[in-house]
Amino acid sequence: MSINKKLNGLRDNFNLLGTRNKILVANRGEIPIRIFRSAHELSMQTVAIYSHEDRLSTHRLKADESYVIGEPHQFTPVGAYLAIDEIINIAKRHGVDYIHPGYGFLSENSEFADKVAKAGITWIGPPASVIDSVGDKVSARNLATKANVPTVPGTPGPIRTVQDAQDFVNEYGYPVIIKAAFGGGGRGMRVVNEGDDLADAFQRASSEALTAFGDGTCFVERFLNKPKHIEVQLLADTHGNVIHLFERDCSVQRRHQKVVEVAPAKTLPREVRDAILTDAVKLAKECGYQNAGTAEFLVDDQNRHYFIEINPRIQVEHTITEEITGIDIVAAQIQIAAGASLEQLGLLQDKITTRGFAIQCRITTEDPAKNFQPDTGRLEVYDSAGGNGVRLDGGNAYAGAIISPHYDSMLVKCSCSGSTYEVVRRKMIRALIEFRIRGVKTNIPFLLTLLTHPVFIAGDYWTTFIDDTPQLFKMVSSQNRAQKLLHYLADLAVNGSSIKGQVGIPQLKKVPDIPHIHDAQGNVIDVTNVPPPAGWRQVLLEQGPEEFAKQVRQFQGTLLMDTTWRDAHQSLLATRVRTHDLAKIAPTTAHALASAFALECWGGATFDVAMRFLHEDPWKRLRTLRKLVPNIPFQMLLRGANGVAYSSLPDNAIDHFVKQAKDNGVDIFRVFDALNDLDQLKVGVDAVKKAGGVVEATVCYSGDMLQPGKKYNLDYYLEVTEKIVQMGTHILGIKDMAGTMKPAAARLLIGSIRAKYPDLPIHVHTHDSAGTAVASMSAAAYAGADVIDVATNSMSGLTSQPSINALLASLDGEINTSINVQHVRELDAYWAEMRLLYSCFGADLKGPDPEVYEHEIPGGQLTNLLFQAQQLGLGEQWTETKRAYKEANMLLGDIVKVTPTSKVVGDLAQFMVSNKLTSEDVKRLANSLDFPDSVMDFFEGLMGQPYGGFPEPLRSDILRNKRRKLTCRPGLELVPFELNNIKEDLQTRFGDINECDIASYNMYPKVYEDFQKMKEKYGDLSVLPTKSFLAPAEIGEEILVTIQQGKTLIIKLQAIGDLNKETGKREVFFELNGEMRKISVTDKSQKVETVAKPKADTHDPFQIGAPMAGVIVEVKVHKGSLVKKGEAVAVLSAMKMEMVISSPADGLVKEVLVNESENVDASDLLVLLEESTPPS
């Protein structure tokens, strides 16, 4: 005997309905499943029907038998469930005894009920005559008049024209509501206030009703202000008996569709409740009602109740009535249809009581942040709630399910029950938080906000509460962190790393070790639990910048600043070291370098590279490191009037940026200007002073000052220093970017400045490009430098700073640095592994380059320029590139070379090599060549004024009539940024933003926008271990990702699927915390010809996209149309409702990319606008 026969035999043992026990549910989704469950408890055989599009739907699998409605594509997806004759034919062919219509579709269609009965099949619901008398809202009003039950003023019958609606408005005034005469669920309803377009509302309501219910008839009634919506659950047998199962409060609605329901009503006065219950039973008896139904009422702010309608069907929210009464309403429906009386079922009014409260939330695949636009796609993850007092009624709710655009957006109903309203409210919050739904948007964040609102807590909600309460849309959304990270790891597994500049994968395969450091007795220092020793930051915090600078000058010796966290990895590893790895070594660093002057860790290129290539927030890096290192000052690099950008910005943008940097953890600001333009420098200096930071105004050192006839000689540097001192600085910085400061030059320059300014602290920075940095910095220390820049041994030398241990050895016994030599050696073990971990970004430099005295290429740029030359196919011409760099510098007037001016020289050099141009060729052809933008910016004056002026006639020839010639500071001609407007714009586009986001956007608008898009797509990638960030995981490899304290994801790559040749995608399978997850990824190496519509950029107001998948029923514009913001451009039909798509901006229609009746997916580009001013 088969298992199926055995199971059927078990049902036969408790058969209650005899031989007539086969039931068909003419519906889809969750309600058939709900009905099947009660039917199976009654020992019935169940039959599901489904459309071709619903062939994978869960409801057909929950039935004993299932049959498709018609042939594929014979009916529309919705039309299949409205195909009366086809459904009845299926029932007759397969010996069905009962048909239950569920809710929606044909549940209130009297023609269907009549044909079912005439076919000899029992209809589970009121007979056709009763449906006619109550299902039509106009007929229901007539019924109420007969029963002497109050109703809201409305048209006496259905209306056919807009004029009919206008006549009613003329008599009763606004507001009014236009309602579909047939159907419910919020379909075909429009509220019209004074000033609204009555004709358009009538047309939309009628069209929507026709689509959803097959009948576009509407009526109009007065719209009450802030009413409650109370409905009474009714049961009536075929013997004239009627009972109520008490009431439900369904006031929390959106688009007239219920969102949250409560049973019983919390705040309804007893006398009002009793009156409503009495009227409900009276109405049912008046019309000879049979089976289950719901009498619906509105209660105004004076507790007057008005009858609306009777819904002649089961309701979505029937579950909460079942929870408080213990009565299976569906089972009662079936047995009543089979002839049982209420008394036989034990359903007597005086025996029915309520226990506690119940709340139902409808979890839908809608995005509340986008006006509840339905979302479609595949459920990547579905983990449901459960536990005591939690009931779930779902349909296609499982991982892998496809959410179709053709049907209602409800995913699952969650019903919670308990002893009190407050207990149930808290239980529902707990249950909603337990849900994990990924792949589509849901309304859970909105529901959580709603359930925690004071109005909901009090139970004082009304029907337009959601519309009237914009605070409900300030939601705390699920971060979806794990799933977003899986998408990144899946793309990495299929397509490899997309990080620019990466060559190969990391050489370090293991997790980096955190080295131990030891005290003088050889004991390991517990850097995690023991606070680090007080350092120079405590001096700064306690005594302020002025006194801090004095004590630095008074220190008996030379202090050291470690550049490992910024300039060292910028010079050697293309600025690619991540926060993840800096944070790991930060506690150890706080102990090992406790007596250091500072850690250079922020600003300069690290700022934009963090967002641009590492996809992480530079401000989060600063805050993270600051928390881990409270004792050592942090220094950043500030490019004067440029901030951390590559060109001048309005002064208020610099002030704003510096304030955020100071507030978030920067202590010392090394301020420089790439041309030593003191007007540009002063902007940054003044900003630091306003913010309360330590000012380190800096002289940029260029070339070898010992060469006779050199433009930048001792007199020049002393002159600039004097002006900086007059400007006011706490510390003087000397920045030797190319490492061209020889030991003799260091002695001469530092010695001369020290002699002239004995109380001025001097801080010297160099690069070891020529291999002489240790000697030069030793000479600087002996000449009176107060602070020298160094890097940890494994990150030193070549284009980086000199080795800290090498310098300590050079000064040992003569100059005190207060640095613990043993500690820095122990600390360096970590960075030795970092060089292996970031080997894929290392420059192929074999040793020092003494030619730097000739070409003067800055250390950081040297590695970048080599990489760029290789990218441009000029790698084999590297020697030629260096020669061209020297020539380009002279063409530009022998300028100071620091970012961004060094980039100008580099761009011109590569331009010359690429086009095989000599310096003479450039001069001769200048008025006909198209130079790089950076060169044009320089000659225009956007980077400031070079010492000695611009070379002429080259400047005039290059600019021609393309650019102006600035003679003043560029910032003076820039309009100040409207910071509040920028904030509002960013909040509109990206949600929760802060002042740091504004500062980032001001510096790099496009980079910031791209970073936000990357974050939206993949989440916070900074939590990934670096190996997993840069290299594809191996099959079976386990990755531990800590996303917050106490929360660690265990991820294991299980398999990569074969290429789908039609879509060009592969399925990537992961195990996440032991649960299988599947991610679909486009294989970028494959070329697949697909016809795909372009997608709208949601951040570009000139690109109007489809808010959801559906069908375009009307296009309202054409190419050349002028549209205003908010004006309709198209109408979309989806999930049985119509949606007007409005223009987000004024503009001229450049292109219409869609036609009427065309299917579209979410975000498909529909209309493209361009700048224009529409007529007023």
Image: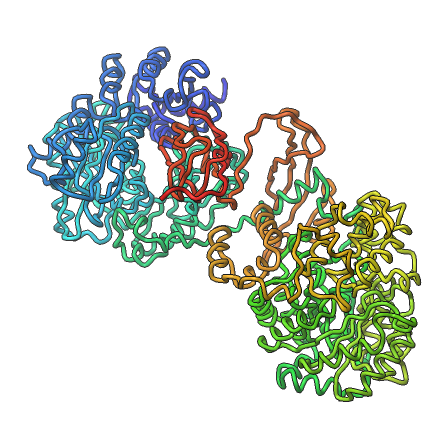
The residue nearer to you, when weighing 760 against 290, is 760
Residue at image coords 73%, 58%: 577
Please state if 291 lies on the left or on the right of 1077 as rendered: left
Q: As drawn, is 810 to the left or to the right of 617?
A: right
Could you tell me residue 658's position as x and y percent? 60, 69
Q: How many marks?
A: 0
Q: Quadrant of residue 634?
A: bottom right
Name the quarter where the C terminus is drawn: top left
How was the colour assigned to the protein in this rendering? rainbow
For the point 46% across and 23% down, which residue is it?
Answer: 53
Q: Position of residue 593 (x, y in %)?
A: 76, 75
In this orientation, which residue lies closer to the viewer: 786 or 1036?
786
Q: Percent position (x, y) of residue 1130? A: 40, 33
Tell me where residue 1060 sits by quadrant. top right
| Closest to the observer, 56 or 478 | 478
Viewer-closest of 855 and 555: 855
Left/right of residue 744 with respect to residue 587 in the rendered view: right
Above/below status of 610 relative to 782 = above
What's the residue at 34%, 15% (across, down)?
91
Tell me: residue 817, above or below residue 321.
below
Work out whether residue 334 can be spotted. yes
Whether residue 1023 can be seen here: no
Residue, far front: 953
Q: Position of residue 299 (x, y in %)?
A: 17, 47
Q: Is residue 1145 left or right of residue 718?
A: left
